[in-house]
Amino acid sequence: MPHSTHHPSAFCVTELSPQHCTSFLGPFAPADQPELRMIGIMSMNGSATLHGSSSAMGSPTDQAMLAAVRAWSDAILVGAQTVLAEDYSPLRQPLPSPAHDHSVTSRPLPRFAVLTRSLNIDLTARFFSQPHDSSPIIVTAVHPATDTRRTSLITTLRNRGFEVWELPDLSPRAVVTMLYRHGLKRLSLEGGPSIYGQFLEADLVDILHLSLDPHLSSPVELPFVQASTPMSRRFRPEAIAADKNGVVFIRYRRIHE
């Protein structure tokens, strides 16, 4: 189990290794209660990318934390531009996970829910061109029947096993409500920054799993959160850990004041 390396007044900072990431998820909401967990990594001064992507940051433990949150999830919310920029790969069965908790590892494979108003995607990218073991959902806006480009794109996606939802309302709350109606109640949110901003503005984030990479970068290439209007949300830290690579992991819970 993780062992204590420092003892601040409020709680212990533990040393975290990949095989213990599931225990770091903390308490789960009841199975019938919706919960949304946001997960992401940033540099010490708040950049979501280093040299153009987040892949230059993190560690094996950070990857294990992402796998643990995915294993907990019913659906993984992510923007299409993040899927392309980070070269997402399809989910395979079994899902790679450090978890030893049977309640997590025995769950069905989660489904990706890819958010894209414009449906501006690259069908040759591996996420869209390779098979998934769990049918992904593309969440997009309703388009006119005269838009032949979108009609053709949607047909291709459906032929490749994707489920396409065309919604009249693409607000975060409307998307989450639709996922809940389909029985997908454990939601993880992987970004990018503008998607984080939208869901924080809507005050839908219950828990934040934040990885703090030990890099300082200048300039800040891409702020971790980009909201359309000024906003502030307060969270309470529940657990803090660090791995041998210097990545700090914090689990925050939303405080509703």
Image: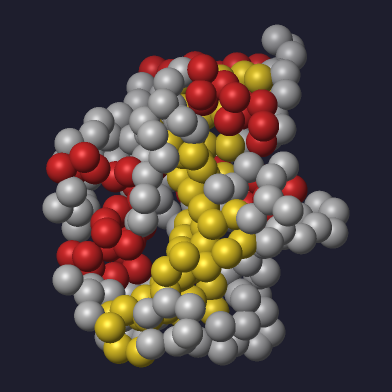
Q: In this view of the protein, which residue sits in the foreground, 40 or 79? A: 40
Q: Name the residue furthest top.
A: 145
Q: Residue at x 65, y 88 (%)?
A: 218
Query: Can see residue 257?
Result: yes
Query: Can see residue 75?
Result: no
Q: In this view of the protein, which residue sits in the foreground, 37 or 213? A: 37
Relative to 121, residue 48 above or below: below
Relative to 212, residue 137 above or below: above
Q: Residue at x 25, y 31 (%)?
A: 108
Residue 242, quarter of picture: bottom left
Left or right: residue 223 versus residue 102 is: right
Where is residue 65 shown, x and y percent of the image? 33, 61
Q: In this view of the protein, which residue sits in the foreground, 78 or 251? A: 251
Where is residue 44 shown, x and y percent of the image? 56, 83
Q: Name the residue furthest front.
A: 9
Left or right: residue 250 versus residue 115 is: left
Q: Residue at x 74, y 48 (%)?
A: 201
User: What quarter of the picture does the N terminus occupy?
Assistant: bottom left
Residue 127, quarter of picture: top left
Where is residue 172 shown, x and y percent of the image? 66, 36
